[in-house]
Amino acid sequence: MTADYYPLQVLLLACSGWVNREQQRTIEYLVEENRVLKEQFKGRKLRLTDDQRRRLAAKGKQLGRRLLNRVATIVTPDTIMRWHRRLIAFKWTHETPTPGRRGIMRAIRKLIVRMALENSTWGYTRIQGELKDVGHHVGRGTIARTLKDNGIKPAPDRPSSWKTFLRAHWGEAAATDFFTTEVWTPRGLVTYYTLFVIDLKTRRVHIAGSTPNPDEAFMAQIARNLTDAIDGFLLPHRFLICDRDTKFTDQFRRILGVSGVDIILTPYRAPNCNAFAERFVRSIKEECLDRMIFFGESSLHRATREFVEHYHIERPHQGLGNEIIEKTLYIPVPSAEVRCDERLGGILKHYRRAA
């Protein structure tokens, strides 16, 4: 009986060995083909979709880590096994329904906060009405919770923003501040304090004066110059924003008050409340003063004068839509050569076409 089956066993072993060799050659060819395809990327990272990762993870789990070490070429075996663990975790992860009402949409929350911040006198009912006009039906309780979550107080206790105040007084409000410059003099290195005033609507700047000692007499004379009945810079203005620096003396404020200009003091340590003046200080420092060494007071006056002219008639301003404050009346020729106008030896430049 055993002798009769022996030739059949030999035949089966021979056939299985031939099949295994064919499978091994097929696997070796596919592995080599994958290597060639991978070399075509030349170091670029292979991007796989979630479905491709799922298919590779399912097949890789059936092969096991030992065989994957031999045949995996696109990614490492550890990566395939990690994908498989994620698939198992995703299978047993179920979203737990939360009781209660569904949360309000994020876009509506942002709109509620925006309306409250931009309109300090609006209560919950007014905000509810405005939301209804734009197609959102929201309850007063939802509006109240949204404002509370964002730290916004109810309407009677909600302060008005500086942005709203400034826009309401466009053309009537100006701001002032000092900037300092180090100047070499016969006495050595001296700090000069320069006072300027900026019109908030047009961004026009007026240099009021520079001195190493901004005492009460200096500030009083500056106040008289700014409120002069003929060419005072503050003539069309009713408000002047300044910080609580002690250099703004009581006499300075009194002279402005007599002329009809009310002083608005910014809060302590709040430079953003005088942002237009602070931005001008940054501009003149970065674009001009920090790039020069000054020998004598006259060199400082010349630099500030040149920068203010450049600031008014040549430099575009982002706050004005990249427009120039004082446009010159000339018609450029489109085909004309582009010329470069320089100030202060090339520190300040402006490009234009010849008229």
Image (cartoon, helix red, strand yellow):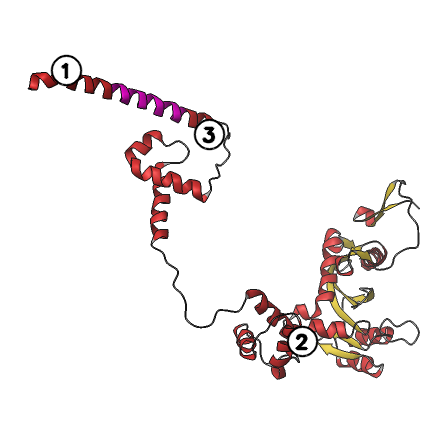
Q: Between disc 3 and disc 2, whose residue precedes?
A: 3
Tag nearer the camera, 3 or 1: 1
Q: Between disc 1 and disc 2, whose residue precedes?
A: 1
| Location of residue 329 with respect to 210 vertically, above or below | above
For the residue carrying disc 2, how many other residues have a C-alpha within 10 Å: few (<14), some (14-19), or many (20+)?
some
* Residue annotated with mark 3: 38
What amino acid type should be assigned to the residue bearing mark 1? Pro
What amino acid type should be assigned to the residue bearing mark 2? Asn
Relative placement, left or right, of 46 versus 7 is: right
Q: CA distance from mark 1 to mark 2?
A: 98 Å
From the image, which quarter does the N terminus lie in? Answer: top left
Q: Quadrant of residue 251?
A: bottom right
Q: Which mark is residue 109?
A: none
* Rendering coords of residue 185 (x, y %): 77, 58
What amino acid type should be assigned to the residue bearing mark 3? Lys
* Residue annotated with mark 2: 119
| Location of residue 342 with respect to 261 vertically, above or below | above
